[in-house]
Amino acid sequence: MSRTVIRGGLVITASDEMHADVLIEDGRIAALAASGTPAAEAWTAERTIDATGKYVIPGGVDAHTHMELPFGGTFASDSFETGTRAAAWGGTTTIIDFAVQSVGRSLREGLDAWNAKADGKCAIDYGFHMIVSDVNQETLKEMDLLVEEGVTSFKQFMAYPGVFYSDDGQILRAMQRSAENGGLIMMHAENGIAIDVLVEQALARGETDPRYHGEVRKALLEAEATHRAIKLAQVAGAPLYVVHVSAQEAVAELARARDEGLNVFGETCPQYLFLSTDNLAEPDFEGAKYVCSTPLRPKEHQAALWRGLRTNDLQVVSTDHCPFCFVGQKELGRGDFSKIPNGLPGVENRMDLLHQAVVDGHISRRRWIEIACATPARMFGLYPKKGTIAPGADADVVVYDPHAEQIMSAETHHMNVDYSAYEGRRTTGRVESVLSRGEPVITEREFTGRAGHGVYTPRSTCQYLN
């Protein structure tokens, strides 16, 4: 039996803060006891970690990543190996990535392909959502089987006609199925048909720079699609999770639905909280680094997103980590913004940026853990195995130094991408050590993990629907 004790830290979960020692046995949390008490002092272990003056928090759960995603004629630049290693450096110990169904192929084929990409490569634990690109009778049957196997969430797109797009009828059928089988539909809510018209018109006017990516993907078209997705879910009697909410008008749609008592949930991402159209407008094609969809919005939208996180109209902050190098990948869109691969790197930055939000007074410490660890674990059927520090939970634990200062930079990050979306940003707080199921992955700012430690983790259904 291997035992580790973490002594002297402030243990923070979504519900509690206490100065406690944490006993880990065989990869799980065995007990907590107030620091300095006879019960805690009596523990012996092969490994002792001194967390005095530090936070002891659950490993982050990033419920939205795209490692090795094929997109726009290229692939996301992080593999499962590099991406999960970078996640660990940033205090995240579980990712849920997206397996992709290709049109004309089965869900199973897509899931098998993604399992093969990840198997034996990951430094931390992982699960999969399923992107449903082709709704038909066979697909609907497969959804039932996948839910039974622990792939309990399905993503659909109202955007990207000709690639991932589903029409309202396909969306309704998938929602009806999920209402029966307990699955959760995740929606990319943008009116892609209308956006394509605006893209064509912008390019015809010679508006080719990256900033036009944000201008054509209008906030009203995010709000319209969000409203439509909510109504379709209501018709189907199904829950709905809207991914990467970026616009205040879309937040208002979610808030209205939740006020009506609907099972509607919303996720936002650090890029919408910390970046804006000012970044998209950076000169010399630098704005291409910030092209993602939904797009960055004008700064005034940020206040609505922070408010949504405080009022619980938004429940989760994930990254939508989908990195493309500036050189050779983002540059595919020089002279035509619509050809810039959509996506930003961020899996390593999320926990630190949200801690900065604590420092800045946007959210509390417990809310930080709630939106980054506990709620994503509950939303996607991983709690209390993941997302908390409690007896029986996996020992996914981060020792976090709340006082260390850092400057975010591509020079020092571990993501396999040649720029940082947060280059030069000063933040307070930094990961010091990370355990994944009791095994050290980061030890006092050194990587001590290994590819293949991370295991595939089946999930139960959404734990907010019981």
Image (cartoon, helix red, strand yellow):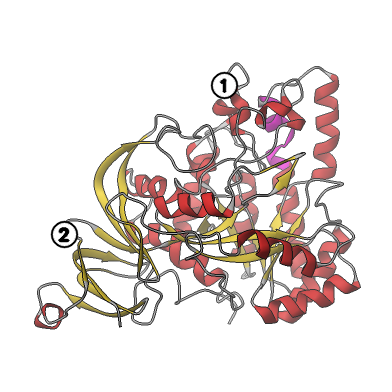
Residue 123: x and y, percent?
48, 59
Residue 82: x and y, percent?
52, 49
Corner quadrant of residue 114: bottom right
Q: Which mark identifies residue 462?
A: none
**Residue bearing the label numbered 1:** 282
**Residue bearing the label numbered 2:** 52
Q: Is residue 20 above or below residue 414?
A: below
Residue 281: x and y, percent?
60, 23
Residues packed near mark 2 inside 10 Å, few (<14), some (14 to 19) or many (20 plus): some
Corner quadrant of residue 461: bottom right
The answer to whether 238 appears left or right of 123 in the picture is right
The part of the chain drawn in magenta is: 211-220
Q: For this rendering, which residue is in front, 371 or 444?
A: 444
| CA–CA distance in space, label 1 to label 2 | 43 Å
Q: For this rendering, which residue is in front, 344 or 202?
A: 344
Tell me the kind of residue under disc 2: Thr
Residue 92: x and y, percent?
44, 57
Q: What element carries label 1?
A: loop
Q: Are marks 1 and 2 in contact (CB under 8 Å)?
A: no
Nearest to viewer (mark 1 / mark 2): 2
User: Is residue 214 on the magenta stretch?
Assistant: yes
- The quadrant in which the N terminus is found is bottom left
